[in-house]
Amino acid sequence: MDNVLLILLSTTYDREAVIKALEINGKIDTWFYSFPNTIFVKTSMNPKEMSRFIEEKFGENINFVTQIESDYFGRMSSAQWKNFKKVKNFIP
């Protein structure tokens, strides 16, 4: 089952580096940026696993991960999610 997670990163994290690490390790299906240091991802990981993964890869735990409870996001197809990668200022 896929989860939609909101990841809030400290300004010390490089958002692109976090996404690249998640993609390389097969941890996320799709993703899109919203605000600075904010990432929405569709993944099979739960928030605790995601937070632990980011901490292991990038050092101290200065991130916040929460699950989005939304039928709209939960039902999005992969094709729709990929289109959101191009949207810079999307506000859910």
Image (spheres, rainbow, N blue to C red):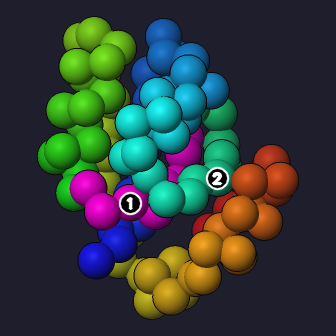
User: Which is nearer the N-term, disc 1 or disc 2?
Assistant: 2
Q: Is residue 91 left or right of residue 83?
A: left
Amino acid type at circle 1 is Thr
Q: Is residue 70 above or below residue 22?
A: below
Q: Which residues are magenta?
A: 38-45
Cα distance in 3D space between marks 1 and 2: 12 Å
**Local secondary structure at mark 1:** strand
Q: Is residue 60 magenta?
A: no
Residue identified by numbered label 1: 43
Q: Nearer the viewer, residue 62 or 30?
A: 30
| Among the 4 quarters of the image, the one containing residue 92 | bottom right
Visible residue check, residue 69? yes
Amino acid type at circle 2 is Phe
Q: Residue at x 56, y 30 (%)?
A: 20
Q: Is residue 84 left or right of residue 12?
A: right
Q: Residue at x 24, y 12 (%)?
A: 60
Residue identified by numbered label 2: 32
Q: Is residue 53 above or below residue 14?
A: below
Which x, y percent locates residue 83? 78, 66
Q: Residue at x 71, y 63 (%)?
A: 82
Q: Nearer the viewer, residue 69 or 32?
A: 32
Q: Residue at x 58, y 82 (%)?
A: 76
Mark 2 Cα shell of 10 Å, populated few (<14), some (14-19), many (≥20): many
Which x, y percent locates residue 87? 81, 55
| Among the 4 quarters of the image, the one containing residue 5 | bottom left
Visible residue check, residue 15? no
Which x, y percent locates residue 52? 19, 32
Q: Nearer the viewer, mark 1 or mark 2?
A: 1
Q: Is residue 86 left or right of residue 57?
A: right
**Local secondary structure at mark 2:** strand
